[in-house]
Amino acid sequence: MINYLLKRLLALIPILIIVAIFIFFIIRVLPGDPAAMMLGPEATAEDVEFLSKQMGLDRPIPIQFIEWISNIVKGDFGNSIFFNGQPVTKVIFEHFGPTLTITLISITLSTLFGIIAGVVAAINHNNIFDRFMMVIATGGAAIPTFWLGLMVVYYFSINLGLLPPTGYKPLSEGLLMSGRYMVLPVLTLVFGSFSLKARMTRSNMLEVLGSDYIRTAKAKGLSELLVNYKHALRNVFITLSTIIGIGIARSLGGSVIIETIFNIPGIGRLLVSSVFSRDYPVIQGIVIFYTIILVSVNLITDIVYVLIDPRIKY
């Protein structure tokens, strides 16, 4: 296991290098000059050229890349262009709190409800509840996140006036106050993620319930509750751990849409605003940050496999 972990950690290095090369050069293909955008439309060409020199954007792109990579090795991701020259790491972590909070809540709720719904649907295969849950799950997987977000805002905020349509309050301002602002974005994320987990749980549960060892357990006189939840569900968790890992990646990726719709000051909204303002250091830092998180989630998922089923060896 230790050798496997070391190999995976070493494999992270080329992945980060490839991602760094890709994001560094691709954003410089986009139209727009950060210096010109900072100074505004009334700035002269001389002013833009002078500011570009101050920010080091006038140097050849390969030289900028080498300098940036050498700074990353030292743990320095550079300074933001549009956040008063603050370090990129500081800017990212200031916006990471809302994204992490909403992601953890949505993953927890969608996993809990998805497992329960999938197991109950599998046990009651082909009855009314099973058909109803599959309709809900299929609809949840098909509905675009941005459309669902707009619809919950229209219904719960504009029509009913029950919840604030946009904004974010940290937990430090009170659980009730923070919860009112989190309900709609969490509901939007949970619905799509719940659908995938419910369908996968049901599918794998049905496959496991048809296995020989399940029939043997029933023939030995074990209760349905013990067979379903101790013997069958434990084997389903191997697949579920993969789905949960994918759900975390999906929630982080969907945070760009959710945070834009609900005006949440998280990393997703920071990325969008940084792209529009051509804040190169922040864009590069966020992409690298996301890459590290996703690779770490995949590694943790592999470790969970062994904890669930000791027969798995690396």
Image (cartoon, rainbow, N blue to C red):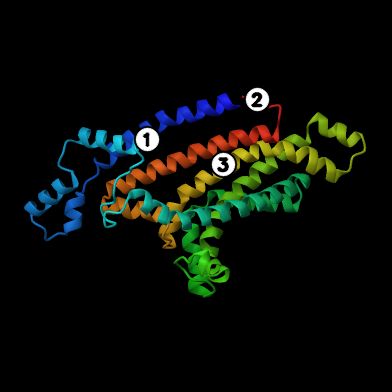
The type of residue carrying mark 3 is Gly
Which residue occupies the foreground of this view, 267 or 126?
267
Element under disc 1: helix
Q: Amino acid at mark 1?
A: Val
Label 3 sits on a secondary structure element that is: helix
Kindly indicate the quadrant of the structure image that contains residue 187.
bottom right
Residue 165 in the figure: left or right of residue 119: left
Question: At x 49% / y 30%, what residue is drawn?
Answer: 9
Front position in the image: 146 or 1: 1
* C-beta proximity under 8 Å, tags 1 and 3: no
Cα distance, mark 1 to mark 2? 30 Å
Name the residue located 56 percent from the left edge and 26 percent from the top edge.
Answer: 4
User: Which residue is under mark 2?
Assistant: 313
Front in this rendered view, residue 251 or 133? 251
Mark before the other along the chain sequence, 1 or 3: 1
Kind of residue indicated by mark 2 = Lys
Screen quadrant of the C terminus: top right
Q: Residues under labels 1 and 3: Cα distance? A: 20 Å
Tell me the distance, in whole angstroms, between the alpha carbons under discs 2 and 3.
20 Å
User: Which residue bears the numbered disc 3?
Assistant: 245
Pinpoint residue 162: horizontal percent, then vertical percent.
54, 74
- Circle 3 Cα neighbour tier, 10 Å, few/some/many (<14 / 14–19 / ≥20): many
Q: Is residue 172 above or below residue 44?
A: below
Pointers 1 and 2 in contact (C-beta within 8 Å): no
Task: Where is residue 272? Give x, y as percent.
Answer: 35, 53
Residue corresponding to mark 1 = 19
**Which residue is drawn at the image coordinates 79% and 37% (left, top)?**
231
* Image-based side of 151 in relation to 133, left or right: left
Front label number (1 vs 2): 2
Residue 291 versus residue 139 in the image, above or below: above
